[in-house]
Image (cartoon, grey):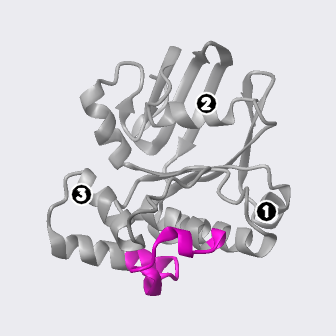
Amino acid sequence: METNESQLSVYMKNVCLAYDKTVLTDVNLNIKKGEFVYLIGKTGAGKSTLLRCLYADVAIGSGEASVCGFNLKNISKKNIPLLRRKLGIVFQDMQLLNDRTVYENLAFVLKATGNKDKNFIKERVTQCLKDVGLDDKAAVYPYNLSEGEMQRIVLARAMVNSPEMIIADEPTGNLDPITSEEIVKLLFRLNKEKGTTVLMATHDYLIINDFRSRVISCEDGRIIE
């Protein structure tokens, strides 16, 4: 490969993404480690497909691609969990477990990735809740939180494994403008202070205007800068 992939969180060359039908073709994309990148595009343009490809939920049809050092073209099933440990994923529908407390939601992620040290789990969960300003909500169940608080918990959950990269799918989509700004500020702080790569899909052009960074777009089945 021509590009030095060791400096990249995302490398894609001539990639085709399809399920049922072709969604994106000739995708060429480099995202450097420590970059903050917005992903925009109309509904149905392929944003979610691209994000799902990055955590190996959608296979690439052709071309070359790697994420956090993992080759997506020939990644084995046993290596997909290893890839996802390097990623913090903020899902559009949050996917919090309502039968578990906030603390248990975050601890579950650590346990699922092989951490068994109770002291480490407690320290890590507590720190991540402090980072999003919700360390007083550890014993609360998600259904007792506001939408803004739930989204911050989702971000804390994405951070708990100290990921190399955060993938956020419309994290401000259901939030009011003030809460949306708080979430984006948290993402930028994570990016600046910890050097975490962030790829954020959004329709919120006010956010993009207020918090300037690189923008890529899904248009007509392609990725455009």
Disc on the earlier residue, 1 or 2: 2
Residue matched to label 3: 111
Q: Estimate the x, y position of residue 64 in percent, counting from the top left.
A: 48, 20
Residue 146 vs 168, above or below: the answer is: below
Image point (61%, 30%), residue name? 49
Residue closest to the eye, 73 or 52: 52
- State yes or no: residue 211 in magenta: no
For the residue marked with disc 3, what is the amino acid?
Lys
For the residue marked with disc 2, what is the amino acid?
Thr
**Residue 2 vs residue 187: left or right?**
left
Q: Quadrant of residue 216?
A: top right
Residue matched to label 1: 207
**Residue 205 vs residue 148: left or right?**
right
Please state, as top left, top right, bottom left or bottom right, where the C terminus lies in the image: top right
For the residue marked with disc 1, what is the amino acid?
Ile
Q: Which residues fall within the magenta stretch?
A: 127-148
**Residue 37 vs residue 152: left or right?**
right
Give the number of the mark in front: 3 or 2: 3
Category of crowding for the residue at label 1, using alpha-carbon neighbours closer than 10 angstroms: few (below 14), some (14–19), many (at least 20):
some
Tell me the number on the disc at residue 49. Answer: 2
Residue 93 vs 64, above or below: the answer is: below
Image point (52%, 76%), residue name? 132
Q: Estimate the x, y position of residue 129 in percent, counting from the top left.
A: 43, 77
Give the number of the mark in front: 1 or 2: 2
- Name of the residue lying farthest toward the front: 99
Q: Estimate the x, y position of residue 221 in percent, counting from the top left.
A: 75, 21
Q: Quadrant of residue 106?
A: bottom left
- State yes or no: residue 131 in magenta: yes
